[in-house]
Image (cartoon, grey):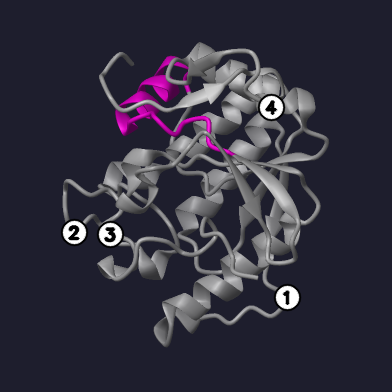
């Protein structure tokens, strides 16, 4: 994991406050140190996981320090059967503190009239509602995934529509997909079988296809019509 790539600096690890010098976060050791320091000051941390490769790797790293961290999964009622089976397999294998989030009034097939409305109802609403209970949110986001994530920082403030502030932590921000797969292989972590069929970014079944552009791993999402579902976009009050 020594490839050259842009780095940002996380200032001092104690409290992530910046008074103790600065460090980059690219090696597994530095990522683990960032996670450990964040957890040492977090009162109510959680991690969101779609059970894609980077999310599973992140959960593995978090479990080394806090095995019972809440793992939030968005049950959209539109997932691939393989995704749900893999979720259940890993939850049992790792004894995860899995929390399945659902829309109070699901609308199966809403994607056919509006993918924005479908994502808002089945993803954004349930997640933002659940995040009201936490002060620290870990994500598996990486800069390489999309142009919309190219400036992603390891530590960012995030404010919910209600005004509730969170620390949003993306420890794998600088990692490539190769880094993720190398870590999974080194730690014998099985990955979702859909990757073997050629999928490179996996969301809900109706809005996920094989990548339209081999150089863009998320080009198979929403038929290339948008880049994000909305959960990683700062809401407007």
Residue identified by numbered label 4: 38
Find the distance from the CA under tag 2 to the CA under tag 3: 5 Å
Q: State whether residue 117 is above or below residue 152.
A: below
Instruction: Give the magenta-colored segment's residue range.
Output: 169-188
Residue 185, x across and y down, in percent:
40, 20
Which of disc 1 and disc 4 is earlier in sequence? Answer: 4
Q: CA distance from mark 3 to mark 1?
A: 28 Å
First of labels 3, 4 by sequence position: 4
Per the model, the C-alpha gap separating discs 1 and 2 is 34 Å
Which of discs 4 and 1 lies nearer the camera? The answer is 4
Which x, y percent locates residue 111? Answer: 44, 79
Give the residue displayed 58% in from the left and 18% down from the top. Answer: 32
Q: Quadrant of residue 160?
A: bottom right
Label 3 or label 1, whichever comes before in sequence order: 1
Circles 3 and 4, Cβ within 8 Å, touching? The answer is: no
Above or below 230: residue 23:
above
Question: Badge 2 local density, few (<14 within 10 Å), some, or many (20+)?
Answer: some
Q: Position of residue 95 (x, y in %)?
A: 72, 33
The span from disc 3 to disc 4 (Cα, nearest Å) is: 34 Å
Quarter of image, res 128: bottom right
Residue 183 falls left or right of residue 156: left
Q: Quadrant of the C terminus?
A: bottom right
Instruction: Residue 212: give its label.
Output: 2
| First in residue order: circle 2 vs circle 3 | 2
Tell me: 190 left or right of 197. right
> Is tag 1's residue or tag 2's residue first in the polypeptide sequence?
1
Q: Which residue is mark 3?
A: 220
């Amino acid at each position: 994991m020594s490839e050259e790539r842009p780095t940002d600096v996380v200032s001092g690890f104690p409290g992530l406050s910046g008074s103790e010098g600065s460090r980059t976060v690219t090696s597994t050791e530095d990522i683990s140190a960032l996670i450990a320091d964040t957890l040492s000051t977090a009162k109510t941390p959680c991690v969101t996981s779609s059970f894609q490769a980077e999310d599973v790797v992140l959960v593995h790293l978090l479990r080394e320090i806090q095995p019972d961290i809440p793992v939030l999964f968005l049950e959209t009622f539109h997932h691939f059967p393989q995704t749900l089976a893999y979720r259940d397999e890993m939850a049992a294998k790792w004894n995860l503190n899995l929390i399945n989030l659902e829309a109070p009034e699901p609308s199966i097939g809403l994607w056919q009239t509006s993918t924005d409305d479908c994502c808002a109802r089945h993803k954004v609403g349930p997640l933002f509602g659940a995040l009201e209970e936490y002060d620290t949110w870990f994500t598996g986001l990486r800069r390489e995934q999309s142009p919309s994530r190219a400036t992603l920082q390891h530590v960012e403030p995030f404010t919910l529509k209600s005004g509730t502030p969170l620390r949003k932590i993306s420890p794998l921000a600088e990692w490539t997909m190769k880094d993720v797969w190398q870590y999974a292989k080194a730690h014998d972590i099985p990955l979702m079988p859909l990757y073997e069929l050629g999928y490179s970014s996996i969301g809900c079944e109706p809005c996920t296809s094989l990548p339209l552009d081999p150089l863009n791993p998320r080009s198979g999402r929403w038929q290339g019509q948008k880049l994000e579902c909305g959960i990683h976009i700062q809401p407007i009050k």
